[in-house]
Image (tube, coloured by chain):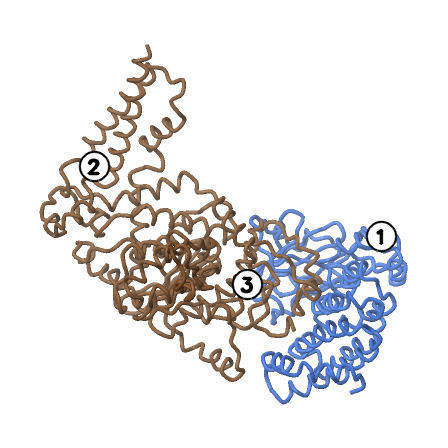
């Protein structure tokens, strides 16, 4: 019977009402027939909610009924929130002035909508697996199906355990490998894939998992099984290599977002009590109306990709990303001045740090990290910022979407340099353990520097690049020479007016690229004439 | 239990129903159980008995919705002593006659009616609505309009303009309510042919010392065709007509306070409506009434103009 269990209730009112002009007090006449007795339309048939609204309903259903999560750490504000200071450390608690969210539920939901890969970390019994299970239910599977399809990592897990087994009779009869049929495991065809305790899987099996995660196919005995696009959820008790086997780097890099299970607040023990006394498992009560079909998931993914990332925000992101890879003394040639160069050569960081003499290692954000940002992590960041905007019912990404998503995406991609002067400051010591807080702070510092440098008002390199992006078709030799001179002049200004930092390095490399494009074009024009 | 079908249904669905009940119960458990079993026996049972000829699927859908509604009714106190008779009457008299021809639409219609009733704070107002409802028994298509019109006349002035528009679509109901000509309905203090114009002033808030709705002395504000009342940090839009009054929370972007006037500036005819020691502070003239606030009272006084004239 539908509609009987309070766990099955979903919000009848819009979960995130569109901002209305407060000067108009007009209201919807339909409000008269809505009220505490429920939605009249749902008394007959479920309303076909728009996908974004349905996604928010799913979020609120999970937050309100399924997972007891009173943490609202993804904060949005319409006006500056007033901090309330606690303790000797004067730790501020902010009361958000706009709808804010619990990352532990929000990030998995966004992963579901964008069909990406999410890692839950946290101690045992904090609801990591339960949350992953709920995501499976959202995809329309039954709790039994999801539980059976969940892959539980263990030290003896073989590739066959993970992917499937060859048919015994075929092994006996086959003359070629291609004759051996494989009984593929059913979880490979699911739209939500869950791997529990993935850091307990042996290295060889991890490699097979990497193929499925990265390339969406499984391979055994020369047989290929193509998997449908899926949202992935992995769990681990420890993200620092505390599992049975070290997780291979490539597998780690495939994970788009890391979300930490926050501790249970004992004030909510009454809700646990009800569950025990009533024998209720919220996983069994997900309202059918909140389930997403394959077409819904494909549509959501397409809608998320269609969300606009404004150029002004993209510039901030470019500036942020340019801070970290640069390492002045890692290479002689300009192109090789990257942390990756010294990492590949096995040069210790502190040796390079000793060579530094010009830049302020406290102010330079690049000094806070051991590595730079990979292309994949930047792509993940853009996707999640778009997904966040979509979730909030916007067609354009806002700065706060980036600020809020960035720490969860870069959690396992950007690593703090514990020896950096920044972390030696007493007020910053906590950032070494609070990675989410540090990454958020890092982005805020970067935005501040971006504004201090006035890049939001005047970014000459971006303007030059935009000029090139318009195309070289029909560009005259005279104009080409003019632009080349402009590039050379800009490079000169960049070299004389700034210390060599990550952003300056990237700007210089961009200008060099532009110079190459124009000079090649100029050579071609000259040869034609 | 008189309805065999309901008895069987309850037995068949016992686990789910009991589960729903346990999760919904609040407060004194014995009292909740007593009230809810009273609802099942005295309201749900007669309703399903009266609708016995319906197809089983339709009865099950209605029973499901009504059972859930019953839990909400108990939680909201509609089965407490003073309101019980009205609720039982709704299920035993009003609903069987109204819903009988519409088995497929019954759950939706029931929820619509209950939701509208829930907007009316007093049992008396709900009683007024149901009294008219029984005489109309509107078809499913006309139900939203009827709820709008009868909800308005039962004490929901915020739905006034939508209800007046709906009256144009429901001439039979307009006739039944004896509301007069459409041009008269434009006047918020017109009560219909029988009662005529309302002339008595309407009072909001409370006496000199007790604030009533208002935490501090209320101040009148105006913002684009709206009359607003501010008291402390709270701000409301004023809705008032002959059928009732309501303050709806509303914070406009721009609102200007009504100028403070001394007593000599106020129209002399209005002073009959307040006490000799009252000190009027603001006096806002609107097309159909005057709204007055006071220096020494938490009251807001709305003085109707009869027929559009002060």
The chain ID associated with circle 2 is: A
Q: Secondary structure at mark 1?
A: helix
Q: Is residue A94 above or below residue B23?
A: above
Q: Position of residue A2 (x, y in %)?
A: 64, 71
Q: Is residue A167 visible?
A: yes
Chain identifier of the blue chain: B
Q: Is residue A145 left or right of residue B64?
A: left
- Label 2 neighbourhood size at 10 Å, few (<14), some (14-19), many (20+)? few
Q: CA distance from mark 2 to mark 3?
A: 50 Å
Q: Is residue A151 above or below residue B19?
A: above
Residue tagged 3: A140
Secondary element at image label 2 = helix
Nearest to viewer (mark 1 / mark 3): 3
Give the number of the disc on residue A183: none
Q: What residue do we see at 32% from left, 37% from top?
A: A454
C-alpha distance separating marks 1 and 3: 57 Å
Task: Specify the label residue B184 is tagged with.
Answer: 1
Instruction: Locate residue A412 relative to residue B4 in the image: left or right.
Output: left
Mark with earlier residue (2, 3): 3
Q: Which residue is mark 2?
A: A335
> In which quarter of the view is residue A41 placed?
bottom right
């Amino acid at each position: 019977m539908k509609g009987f269990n309070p766990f099955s209730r979903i919000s009848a009112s819009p979960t995130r009402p569109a901002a209305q002009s407060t000067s108009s007090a007009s209201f919807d006449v339909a409000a008269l027939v809505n009220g505490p007795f429920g939605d009249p339309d749902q008394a007959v048939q479920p309303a076909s909610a728009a996908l974004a609204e349905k996604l928010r309903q799913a979020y609120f259903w999970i937050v309100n009924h399924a997972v007891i999560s009173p943490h609202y750490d993804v904060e949005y504000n319409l006006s500056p929130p007033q901090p309330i200071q606690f303790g000797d450390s004067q730790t501020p608690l902010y009361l958000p002035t706009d709808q804010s969210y619990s990352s532990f539920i929000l990030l998995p939901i966004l992963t579901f909508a964008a069909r990406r890969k999410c890692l839950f970390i946290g101690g045992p019994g904090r609801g990591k697996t339960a949350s992953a299970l709920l995501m499976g239910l959202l995809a329309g599977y039954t709790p039994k199906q999801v539980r059976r399809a969940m892959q539980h990592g263990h030290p003896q897990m073989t590739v066959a355990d993970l992917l499937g087994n060859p048919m015994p009779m075929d092994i006996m009869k086959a003359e070629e490998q291609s004759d051996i049929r494989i009984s593929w495991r059913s979880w490979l065809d699911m739209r939500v894939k869950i791997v529990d305790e993935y850091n307990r899987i042996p290295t060889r099996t991890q490699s097979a998992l990497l193929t499925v995660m990265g390339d969406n196919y499984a391979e055994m005995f020369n047989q290929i099984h193509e998997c449908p696009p899926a949202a992935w959820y992995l769990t681990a008790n420890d993200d620092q290599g505390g599992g049975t086997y070290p997780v291979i780097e490539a597998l780690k890099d495939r994970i788009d977002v890391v979300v930490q299970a926050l501790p249970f607040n004992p004030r909510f023990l009454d809700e646990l009590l009800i569950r025990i006394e009533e024998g209720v498992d919220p996983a069994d009560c997900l309202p059918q109306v909140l389930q997403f079909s394959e077409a819904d998931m494909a549509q959501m993914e397409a809608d998320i990709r269609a969300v606009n990332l404004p150029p002004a925000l993209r510039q901030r992101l470019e500036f942020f990303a340019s801070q970290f890879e640069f390492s002045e003394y890692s290479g002689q040639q300009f192109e090789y001045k990257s942390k990756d160069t010294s990492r590949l050569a096995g040069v210790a960081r502190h040796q390079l740090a000793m060579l530094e003499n010009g830049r302020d290692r406290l102010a330079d954000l690049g000094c806070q990290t051991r590595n730079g940002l990979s292309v994949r992590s930047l792509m993940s960041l853009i996707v999640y910022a778009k997904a966040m905007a979509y979730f909030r019912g916007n067609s354009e990404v806002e700065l706060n979407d980036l600020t809020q998503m960035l720490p969860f995406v870069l959690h396992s991609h950007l690593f703090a340099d514990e020896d950096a002067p920044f972390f030696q400051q007493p007020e910053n010591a906590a950032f070494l353990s609070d990675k989410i807080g540090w990454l958020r702070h890092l982005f805020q510092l970067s935005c501040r520097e971006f504004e201090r440098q006035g890049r939001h008002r005047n970014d000459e390199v971006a303007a030059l690049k935009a000029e090139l992006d318009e195309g070289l078709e029909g560009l005259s030799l005279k104009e080409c020479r003019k632009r080349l001179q402009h590039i050379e002049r800009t490079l000169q200004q960049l070299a004389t007016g700034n210390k060599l930092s990550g952003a300056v390095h990237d700007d210089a490399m961009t200008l060099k690229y532009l110079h190459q494009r124009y000079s090649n074009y100029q050579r071609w024009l000259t040869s034609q004439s | 239990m008189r309805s065999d079908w309901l008895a069987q249904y309850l037995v068949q669905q016992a686990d789910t129903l009991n589960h729903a009940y346990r999760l919904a119960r609040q407060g004194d458990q014995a009292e909740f159980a007593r009230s809810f079993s009273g609802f099942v026996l005295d309201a749900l049972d007669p309703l399903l008995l009266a609708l016995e000829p319906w197809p089983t699927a339709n009865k099950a859908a209605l029973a499901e919705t009504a059972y859930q509604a019953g839990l909400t009714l108990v939680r909201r106190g509609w089965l407490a002593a003073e309101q019980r008779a009205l609720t039982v009457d709704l299920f035993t008299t009003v609903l069987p006659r109204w819903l009988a021809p519409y088995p497929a639409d019954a759950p939706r219609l029931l929820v619509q009616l209950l939701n509208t009733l829930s907007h009316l704070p007093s049992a008396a107002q709900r009683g007024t609505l149901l009294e008219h409802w029984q005489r109309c028994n509107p078809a499913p298509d006309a139900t939203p309009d009827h709820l709008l019109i009868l909800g308005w006349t039962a004490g929901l002035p915020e739905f006034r303009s939508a209800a007046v528009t709906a009256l144009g679509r429901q001439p039979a109901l307009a006739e039944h309510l004896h509301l007069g000509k459409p041009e008269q309905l434009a006047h918020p203090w017109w009560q219909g042919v029988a009662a005529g114009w309302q002339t008595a002033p309407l009072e909001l808030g409370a006496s000199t010392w007790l604030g009533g709705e208002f935490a501090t002395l209320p101040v009148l504000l105006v913002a684009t065709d709206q009359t607003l009342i501010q008291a402390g940090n709270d701000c409301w839009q004023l809705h008032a007509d002959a059928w009732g009054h309501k303050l709806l929370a509303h914070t406009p972007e721009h609102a200007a306070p009504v100028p403070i006037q001394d007593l000599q500036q106020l129209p002399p005819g209005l002073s009959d409506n307040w006490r000799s020691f009252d000190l009027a502070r603001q006096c806002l003239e609107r097309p159909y009434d005057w709204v007055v606030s006071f220096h020494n009272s938490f009251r807001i006084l709305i003085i109707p103009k009869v027929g559009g004239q002060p």
